[in-house]
Image (cartoon, helix red, strand yellow):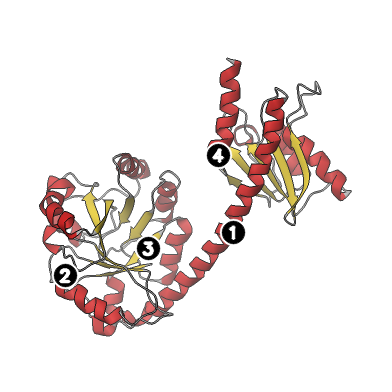
Amino acid sequence: MALLLDPEKANLDALHFSDSCHPDYIFVGGSTGGNPTEFVRNLKSKICNLQSSIPIILFPGNSSQFTPEADAILYLSLLSGNNPEYLVDQQVKSARAVYESHMDFVPTAYILIDGGIETSTMRVTQTKPLDPNDIDKIIDTCLAAEMMGKKLIYLEAGSGAKNPVKPEIIREVKSRISVPLIVGGGIRTPKAMNDAFSAGADIVVIGNHFESHPETLADFCQIKSDNQSLNRQSSNRQSADERFMRLALAEAQKALAADEIPIGCVIVSQNQIIGRGHNLTETLADVTAHAEIQAITAATQTLGGKYLPDCTLYVTVEPCAMCAGAIGWAQISRIVYGAPDPKRGYHTYAPRAFHPKATVTAGVLELECKSLIQSFFREKR
């Protein structure tokens, strides 16, 4: 969570920070002016006694808002507009000062989304925001930003926006970029912040709301703490998923050694492998001898029953329609796969084959899984 403070508007005396109630970052900046140097010095005095260090990061509206007193700067380029002044000219004007300060800088794509009203950013920059209903244009802008070397994407509804950035926009952008995603503008409630986090935002920025309601900071900090706890749980699960997917890759290597299409599978229950398998269609002269079928058969023998509820199946390539049907009949509750199979995968031919309550996680060690099978077919050609 980032707290955005405008040196012209923010009342530092009204904000009360503690070791249990504080943002992760404080952004300092605005669309117009103020005295950022004095403001940052006063802000540092206010937070200096906290046990946790809070980075103060400049979020400048123009080159005059730079101060070497901050810890870092978002080196913003307004990619959603066509005004060269905010695409590159302001950056050129501040470049030498930033360079000589030895301050950390982060090249950031600043992308304004229409928030339902004319914002100060629109007035100052003389640019139009992107239409929130044109998700393709938003995605293309974000992709272009990353390909041009930006290290952060900042989706902004604008200061005082009526409507925050829609969760579906956040979700679609996050699914396509590999750099961190910041979302801000129009976020006035802990629920709105939580919705942005749930959709995939890495950092959520709250600004104007705290100018008029500083007493609500504790409510937002509680949501922040809850999300960080969930993120730790998610990280633990991701680590386990990668570990078991590597074991599925080891099965795929067995198939490769037998000159079979290299797909491997393991089935896990209570953090223990209960079934393993790899592709054996050529060895057994059996078109049904896919890795998933081999692993399901082994797992049912281990448990002594035909159903596998509360089990997770890890497979290196997206299951085909046949295997998806078998996974569904076995009532496996979670499926994790590495590389997608757009030609033969279940998404294309049997999207409802899994048990209705089953969950799917895609893309775990995707590059490794994809590289293995691509190299196999490349040699065959």
Q: Which of label 3 and label 1 is nearer to you? A: 1
Query: Answer yes or no: do the residues labelled 3 and 4 have beta carbons within 8 Å?
Result: no
Tell me how far mark 2 sits from mark 3, CA to CA.
22 Å
| Label at residue 236 | 1
Q: Of label 4 and label 2, which has the lower sequence position?
A: 2
| Label at residue 304 | none
Residue linked to disc 4: 366
Q: Secondary structure at mark 3?
A: strand
Answer few, some or many: residues within 10 Å of disc 2's Cα (few below 14, many 20 plus, some between 14 and 19).
many
Q: Secondary structure at mark 1?
A: helix
Residue linked to disc 2: 36
Q: Residue at x 36, y 73 (%)?
A: 53
Residue type, mark 1 in image: Asn
Q: Of label 3 and label 1, which has the lower sequence position?
A: 3
Q: Secondary structure at mark 4?
A: helix
Residue linked to disc 3: 204
Answer few, some or many: residues within 10 Å of disc 3's Cα (few below 14, many 20 plus, some between 14 and 19).
many
Tell me how far mark 4 sits from mark 2, CA to CA.
45 Å
Q: Determine whether, in the image, residue 258 is placed left or right of residue 106.
A: right
Q: Which of the 4 image quadrants contains residue 251?
A: top right
